[in-house]
Amino acid sequence: MNNHFRETLGVALQHALAHLESLDASSVAATVDLATLRSRLVKPMNQLPMDPGQVVEELVADVRGGILGSAGGRFFGWVIGGSLPAALAADWLTAAWDQNAARYACGPAAAVVEEAAGAWLKEILRLPEAASFAFVTGCQMAHVTCLAAARHGLLAARGWEVEQRGLSGAPAIRLLTSGLRHGSIERAVRLLGLGLDNVIDLPADSQGRLQLPDLERELQRELARPTVVLLQAGDINTGAFDSFPECIAMAKRYGAWVHVDGAIGLWAAASPQYRHLLQGVEQADSWATDGHKWLNVPFDSGYAIVADREAHQASMLHRAPYLITGGDARDEGDWNPEWSRRARGFATYAALRQLGKAGVADMVERCCRHARALVSGIGQLAGTQVLWEPVINQGLVRFLDPCAAANATADHDRYTEAVIARILATGEAFFGPTTWRGVRCMRISVCNWQTSENDVERAVRAVAAAL
Ligand SMILES: *Cc1c(COP(=O)(O)O)cnc(C)c1O
C-alpha cells in the first residue's frame, strides 16, 4: 500500500539535509522581504487535495530566503539555540510517533522518558532531587506554571484556596524584582490575574543585581502581604546573576516565595567554571528555564521546576471521569498547564544523552568563550564601544557615529541601528538590537552548539566590513 509516508518524508529529509548542510555557506539573515513571502505563500486555499510530496516541495520553494540561519553557528540574535542532531532526530520521531503526552495511558513510553529526563535536568541543574517538574513550551509557560504554584502556596498558607475561590477577595500577591525582569514575567502575571500593579521594580546595582537593603525595606513595608521575590539567573541583556544566598535567605525570613528566571543562566550549573554564579540558587522555591535556548533542543521546549510538589500539583492537577490515571506512573498532565500535548520529553532526553554531563559543560563553556571573543574582537574595531563584557554568553556593544555631535545619544542610536542592518545585509552574521540603560546597542548572544572559532572570526570581519 502506498500511504505516501515514505516518499513524503523522503522529500522532507532531503530538504532538511540540504538546509542544514548549506548553513555555513548561506546567508544567516533573510534574503526576501515580507511582500515577497506573502506573494508566494498567501494563496487561495486549494479546493482539491494535493499530493503530499508536492505540498512539501512547494512549501520549501515558497519559504526560500525567509528561513533565518538560526540553526547554524553564525546566529547571535536574541537568545536562540540550534538543535543537536540527536534532539532533532528525536523530535522528528516525536512527530512520527504522535503520542498525546498528557497521561501515561495515552503514551506510556513518552511518560517514562519525561520522568527520566526530568530527573536528569534536576541533576545537571543541581536542583533538589525531590522537586517536581513540568515540560512546557518555553520559559514563558514555565513562569506561568511556577507562579501558579506560588500563588497556590502563598494563598493556601493564608487559608485561601485560590483554585476554588478565585482571586477576588484574596490577599493581593506582590512580586518584588530588580526591574530587569524579562517580559515573559509580565505576561505570566497577567495570565494568572496577579496584576501588573503588584509587580514592584526595585533598583538594580551596576552588576544588574537586586540590592539587599531595597529588598528588605520592601519586605518590611507590608509584612503580611503574600510575596514572590523574583530573582534572575542570566539577565536577557547582560547575563547578570542575582546574589542568591543573601536574597533567598532574606526572602525566606519574611515568608516569601522565591522564583528564579533561569531561562539562560541556570545552565551555568553544568560547568565547574561557571557554577559559582549560581551558588545558593537551589534554596529557591521554583525555577524556570529553557531547553530550546542553551540546551539546543528544537522549539518549543521549556522546564518548570518546583520545590513544593504539593503546591505545584494543586495548581495543575486534572482529574475527569474518563481519564485513566497512571497509578504509579507519572501523568504529565497533572503538572502541566496543557491537556493534549506534544511528547516534549523525547528531544530533551536525546539532547542530554548525546552530550552527557561533560558535553553540556563543554557547550556552555564554549559559548561563553565565543561570546567573550566576539565582544573583544568587535570591541577592538574603531568606533565601537563595549557596554557589557560577557559574564556568561551575553554581551553588549554599540557603534559611535563619527559625525555625531558630542554626546549625541540619538545619533549613536541611529548609527548603531544602521550598522546592525548593514551586518545583516552581508548575510555573514546575525545580531539584534536592544535598548540598555537608555542607549541602543547590539546584543551578542552565543547559544548554538555549532558556533566555532571560524564563525567568530567571520562575524568580526562582517562587523568590520559593515563599519
Ligand atoms: C527567553 C527568555 C524568557 C522567555 O522564554 P521563552 O522560552 O521565550 O518563553 C524568559 N526569561 C529570560 C531571561 C529569557 O532569556
Image (cartoon, helix red, strand yellow):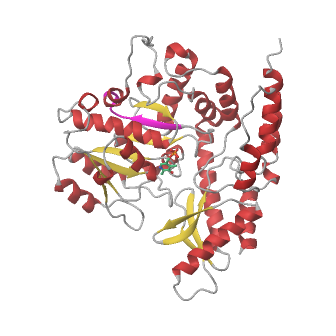
Confirm whether residue 86 shows in the render. yes
Q: Is residue 400 above or below residue 185?
A: below
Confirm whether residue 126 shows in the render. no
Picture coordinates of residue 59, whole percent (x, y): 77, 39
Picture coordinates of residue 57, whole percent (x, y): 82, 36
Which quadrant would residue 464 be assigned to in this image? bottom right
Which quadrant would residue 197 be assigned to in this image? bottom left
- Residue at x 66%, y 75% (from the top left corner): 380
- Residue at x 50%, y 34% (from the top left corner): 136
| Left or right of 135, for residue 45 | right
Q: Which of 306 and 166 is in front in this view?
A: 166
Does 223 lie within the magenta span? no
- Residue at x 42%, y 64% (from the top left corner): 207
Q: Is residue 179 above or below residue 381?
A: above
Q: Nearer the viewer, residue 176 or 367?
A: 176
Picture coordinates of residue 12, whole percent (x, y): 79, 32
What range of the chain is rendered magenta? 302-310
On-image quarter of the C terminus: bottom right
Q: Is residue 443 above or below residue 16?
A: below
